Image: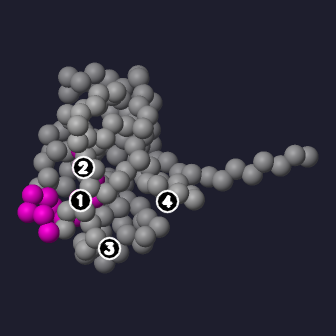
Amino acid sequence: MRCRFGPDGKLYVATGDSTNWNLAQQTDSLAGKVLRLNDDGLIPPDNPFVGSKAFSPEIWTYGNRNPQGLAWQPGTGLLFETEHGPSGFEGKGIGGDEVNILEAGKNYGWPEIHHTMTKEGMVAPLWNTHPHAHPAAQCFTTVINSRC
């Protein structure tokens, strides 16, 4: 699990699939998701699934396998996420570690899609690896180039 406060002051909690990869697509489960909460633990009223009987209202995104890092890109505010891909024991090959740009309410596909697969209604990764790269926490930095 990874937790970060976003530029909106909300707490983003990234949860893995708990080695039960089907949970990532089960919308009543908090596993395999990125959750969004107020700093007091309450659910923001503008979360994408508030009021839906089919989804837990904490869910910001779903279909995430094993998120390892969350970072907001300076200047754009885009939320980037890194996650581990299949380990091999799932029967889905190895590699497929991902970089995603997360958007509210989107389904990032695990375990239905992985690596370079696509499926309507699911977001394919911005970038993925083969073989493993094992991404971890991430951050953005501003590089200053000066000449001596």
Q: Which mark is residue 77?
A: 4
Alpha carbon distance from label 2 to label 3 = 19 Å
Alpha carbon distance from label 3 to label 4 = 18 Å
Dot 2, how many residues are within 10 Å of its Cα: few (below 14), some (14-19), or many (20+)? Answer: many
Is residue 84 in sight in this rendering? no
User: Secondary structure beneath disc 1?
Assistant: strand
Cβ–Cβ under 8 Å for marks 3 and 1: no
Three-letter residue code for mark 4: Gly
Three-letter residue code for mark 3: Asn
Identify the residue position indicated by label 2 in the image. 62
Three-letter residue code for mark 1: Ile
Q: Earlier in the sequence, mark 4 or mark 2?
A: 2
Percent position of residue 129, x then y: 42, 28
Dot 1, how many residues are within 10 Å of its Cα: few (below 14), some (14-19), or many (20+)? Answer: many
Three-letter residue code for mark 2: Tyr
Q: Earlier in the sequence, mark 3 or mark 4?
A: 3
Dot 3, how many residues are within 10 Å of its Cα: few (below 14), some (14-19), or many (20+)? Answer: some
Q: Is residue 9 magenta?
A: no
Identify the residue position indicated by label 1 in the image. 59
Identify the residue position indicated by label 3 in the image. 38
Alpha carbon distance from label 2 to label 1 = 7 Å
User: Secondary structure beneath disc 3?
Assistant: loop
Q: Name the magenta segment's main secondary structure.
A: loop
Is residue 120 in sight in this rendering? yes
Residue at 40% across / 43% down in the picture? 100
Cβ–Cβ under 8 Å for marks 2 and 1: yes
Alpha carbon distance from label 4 to label 2 = 20 Å
The part of the chain drawn in magenta is 51-63
Percent position of residue 26, x then y: 13, 48
Cβ–Cβ under 8 Å for marks 4 and 1: no
